[in-house]
Image (tube, rainbow, N blue to C red):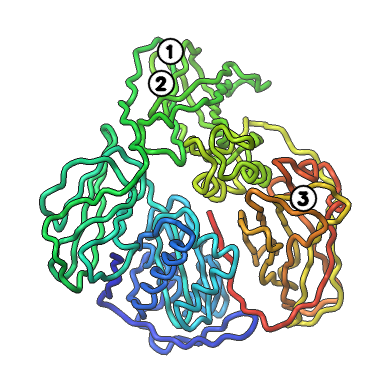
C-alpha cells in the first residue's frame, strides 16, 4: 500500500493565479519554510488524498492497457511535492529547479539532479501541470497528451506524486536492484482477504508470508497471482523472498483491511504462468597467463545467471598509444550466463576496450593489462540499436515496427528487434527502445565525423504581436511512393520571440518516442511511429502550436538536420533522407496555419 502519511512540520498555503499562456503564482500567504537549492527537504503534504488518487488513477490507466501497476514510492513523492511547492514559492513553471534571487529567476539544477537528492534513479521521467482542480482532471489532461501519456504507460516500476495549490508533479523511476511487490494494484484499502499480488522481475522461485509469520513453501515464481491475507482488520503486511540460483532478494507491501474475511490459512492460489526460468550457476574464471575478464550488464533480462545473458559481443581492444587507431585485437565472443567474457594471450599495455552487442550501443572503457588475470567492469549495454549504427533512433523503431507481435519463425520476424532475447518482439522490446531513444554509443577516440547535410527547410514567420498563436504544419508531399511508419521532427526557433506550446502528430502515429520542448534553447524534439502498419503520402505528419512572446516583423523556424537531431521519415528501417544526405525539402513541406487562442497548456515531459 502507498505510504501516504503526514509528517510533523510546517504547512505552506498559497494562492494560484494563472492566465492563458504561463502560470503566475501569488506570494505564499504562510511559508514557515522557503525553499532554495536543489531539493532534499521532506515537505509535509498539503493534500494526501489528491496525491494518492493520482497514483490510483495512473494505475487504472495502465490496467486499461494491460500494463503492470506502478508502486508508490515515498521518496519520489517527496521529490515531486518539493517541486510543486518550490514552483509556487518562486513563481516559475519548469522541470528544472529555480530560485528567485533579488527578483531574478535563477536556474539551480536539472530535474534529474533534484530527483537524485531523494532517490537513486535508474532512468526517470516526470510530468508536471498547473491549473487543474482535481486528480481526475490532471490525469485526464496528461493522458490526452502523447508525451505525458507515454510516461504514465512507460516502463518505470515506481511512481510518486506531489500536489500544492493546483500545481501537480508526477515522478517515475526504477531503483536498480529493487523488485517491487504490489497488492491490489496499489489500492489503499480492501474489504476482502483475497488480494492480487504483482511482483516485478524474473525469478526461479518464491515464498511468501503474512505479517512476519511463517514462510510458505518454495514454489515456482509467478508475476501475478492471488493470495490470502490474515483475516484481521488493520494494516496487513505481505512479504516475498525471491531467488534464482545464488541470487535472492526480499520485497513487501501493505494494505489496510477494513472488513475481516473468512480464510485463516495463508496459501498461494495457483494461476497459469510462464515456465520458470532455468536456474544456472555463475561462471568461475580459470587461471591464465595474461588475460582480461570483462563484465557487462544486459537490459531486459532475468537476474543472472541465465541463458538469456549468453549473447554474441563484438570486442575491440585498441592500444591507447597507437596514433593510427588500428585495433590490436578484434573478435566476437559469446558472453557467459552472468555476462562475462575472457580475452586470452594479451600483450600488457594501456588499451581502450570497446564492446557492443548485436542490438546494443557500444561501450568504451580504459583498461590497463598487466601479466596475470585483469578485470574490467564495462557496465550496462543499452538496448535498441537494431540497425547497428550505434544509435537508438528512428530507423530502429521503424524496423521493430515491421516485426512487432512476431515470434521466432514468423515471416516478418526480425531477430535483431528481439531486444530482450525472449523469442518475441513485443511491448517489452518496445519499452527498452523507447527508454533509450536518442542515445548514442561510445566511439573510438578520434571516430568518424558525419558528412554535412543539405540546407534544411525553413519557415519564415512575419508580423506577429505578443499573445498571438499560430501553427507550423509539417506535411509529407505526395511525391514519395513509400509507406511511412516513423518520423522525427526537430525544430530550432528564437525562444525570445516564440514559445512552443504543443505538438499534435498524425492520428496514426500513436507510439511516441520523443516529446520535448526546450524553452531555454528554442528547440522542439519529437518522434513518433506506427506499430505494424504504415501511412501513405500525402499526409500531415505533425502540427506544432506556437505562442508569440514578443512582437516581431520576421523570424524563422528551421528543421534541424545535424547528427543527433535529424528530422527524417523512415519505412522498414530505411531513412527517406538517406540519413541526412538528401534534401528534406524534396519530401517535407512547411506551412503556417491559424489556431484558436483558447489553448489548455501544460509543460511537456522530460525524460532521461
Q: Residue at x 72, y 76 (%)?
A: 547
Q: Are circles 3 and 1 on residues that touch, CB within 8 Å? A: no
Could you tell which of marks 3 and 1 lies nearer the N-terminus?
1
Q: Quadrant of residue 286?
A: top left
Q: Are circles 1 and 2 on residues that touch, CB within 8 Å? A: yes
> In the picture provided, is 510 more to the left or to the right than 178?
right
Q: Residue at x 71, y 82 (%)?
A: 597
Identify the residue position indicated by label 3 in the image. Answer: 561
Q: Quadrant of residue 518?
A: bottom right
Mark 2: secondary structure: strand
Mark 1: secondary structure: strand
Identify the residue position indicated by label 1 in the image. Answer: 290
Identify the residue position indicated by label 2 in the image. Answer: 374
Mark 3, mark 1: which one is toward the viewer? 3
Comparing 442 with 172, the one in front is 172
Q: Is residue 377 visible?
A: no
Amino acid at each position: 500500500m502507498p505510504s501516504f502519511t503526514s509528517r510533523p512540520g510546517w504547512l505552506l498555503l498559497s494562492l494560484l493565479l494563472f492566465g492563458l499562456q504561463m502560470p503566475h503564482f501569488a506570494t505564499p500567504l504562510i511559508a514557515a519554510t522557503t525553499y532554495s537549492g536543489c531539493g532534499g527537504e521532506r515537505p509535509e503534504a498539503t493534500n494526501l488524498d489528491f496525491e494518492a488518487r493520482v497514483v490510483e488513477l495512473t494505475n487504472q490507466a495502465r490496467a486499461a492497457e494491460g500494463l503492470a501497476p506502478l508502486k508508490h514510492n515515498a521518496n519520489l513523492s517527496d521529490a515531486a511535492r518539493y517541486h510543486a511547492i518550490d514552483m509556487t514559492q518562486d513563481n516559475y513553471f519548469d522541470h528544472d529547479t529555480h530560485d528567485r534571487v533579488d527578483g531574478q529567476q535563477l536556474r539551480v539544477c536539472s530535474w534529474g539532479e533534484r530527483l537524485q537528492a531523494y532517490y537513486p534513479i535508474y532512468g526517470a521521467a516526470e510530468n508536471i501541470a498547473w491549473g487543474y482542480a482535481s486528480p481526475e482532471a490532471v490525469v485526464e489532461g496528461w493522458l490526452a497528451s502523447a508525451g505525458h501519456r507515454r510516461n504514465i504507460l512507460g516502463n518505470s516500476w515506481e511512481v510518486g506524486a506531489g500536489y500544492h495549490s493546483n500545481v501537480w508533479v508526477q515522478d517515475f523511476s526504477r531503483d536498480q536492484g529493487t523488485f517491487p511487490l504490489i497488492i491490489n494494484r496499489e489500492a489503499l484499502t480492501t474489504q476482502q482477504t483475497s488480494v492480487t499480488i504483482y511482483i516485478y522481475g524474473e525469478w526461479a522461485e518464491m515464498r511468501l508470508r503474512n505479517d512476519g509469520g511463517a514462510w510458505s513453501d518454495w514454489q515456482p515464481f509467478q508475476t501475478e497471482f492471488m493470495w490470502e491475507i490474515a483475516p484481521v482488520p488493520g494494516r496487513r503486511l505481505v512479504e516475498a523472498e525471491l531467488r534464482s540460483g545464488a541470487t535472492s532478494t526480499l520485497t513487501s507491501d501493505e494494505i489496510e483491511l477494513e472488513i475481516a474475511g473468512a480464510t485463516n490459512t495463508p496459501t498461494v492460489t495457483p494461476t497459469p504462468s510462464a515456465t520458470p526460468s532455468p536456474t544456472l550457476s555463475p561462471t568461475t574464471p580459470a587461471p591464465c597467463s595474461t588475460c582480461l575478464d570483462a563484465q557487462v550488464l544486459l537490459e531486459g533480462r532475468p537476474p543472472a545467471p541465465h541463458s538469456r545473458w549468453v549473447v554474441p559481443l563484438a570486442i575491440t581492444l585498441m592500444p591507447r598509444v597507437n596514433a593510427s587507431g588500428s585495433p590490436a585485437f578484434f573478435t566476437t565472443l559469446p558472453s557467459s550466463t552472468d555476462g562475462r567474457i575472457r580475452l586470452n594471450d594479451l600483450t600488457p599495455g594501456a588499451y581502450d576496450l570497446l564492446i557492443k552487442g548485436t542490438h546494443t550501443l557500444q561501450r568504451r572503457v580504459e583498461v590497463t593489462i598487466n601479466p596475470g588475470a585483469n578485470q574490467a567492469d564495462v557496465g550496462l549495454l543499452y538496448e535498441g540499436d537494431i540497425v547497428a549504427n550505434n544509435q537508438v533512433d528512428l530507423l530502429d523503431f521503424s524496423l521493430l515496427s515491421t516485426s512487432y507481435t512476431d515470434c521466432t519463425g514468423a515471416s516478418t520476424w526480425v531477430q535483431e528487434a528481439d531486444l530482450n532475447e525472449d523469442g518475441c518482439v513485443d511491448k517489452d522490446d518496445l519499452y527498452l527502445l523507447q527508454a533509450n531513444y536518442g542515445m548514442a554509443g561510445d566511439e573510438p577516440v578520434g571516430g568518424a565525423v558525419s558528412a554535412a547535410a543539405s540546407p534544411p527547410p525553413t519557415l519564415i514567420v512575419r508580423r506577429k504581436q505578443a499573445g498571438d498563436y499560430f501553427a507550423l504544419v509539417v506535411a509529407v508531399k505526395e511525391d514519395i511512393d513509400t509507406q511511412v511508419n516513423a518520423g522525427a521532427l526537430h525544430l530550432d526557433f528564437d525562444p525570445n520571440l516564440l514559445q512552443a506550446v504543443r505538438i499534435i502528430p498524425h492520428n496514426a502515429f500513436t507510439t511516441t518516442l520523443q516529446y520535448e520542448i526546450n524553452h531555454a534553447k528554442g528547440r522542439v524534439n519529437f518522434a513518433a511511429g506506427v506499430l505494424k502498419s504504415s501511412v501513405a503520402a500525402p499526409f500531415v505528419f505533425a502540427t506544432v502550436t506556437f505562442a508569440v512572446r514578443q512582437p516581431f516583423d520576421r523570424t524563422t523556424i528551421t528543421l534541424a538536420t545535424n547528427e543527433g537531431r535529424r528530422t527524417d521519415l523512415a519505412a522498414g528501417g530505411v531513412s527517406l533522407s538517406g540519413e541526412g544526405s538528401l534534401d528534406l525539402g524534396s519530401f517535407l513541406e512547411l506551412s503556417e496555419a491559424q489556431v484558436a487562442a483558447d489553448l489548455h497548456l501544460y509543460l511537456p515531459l522530460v525524460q532521461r
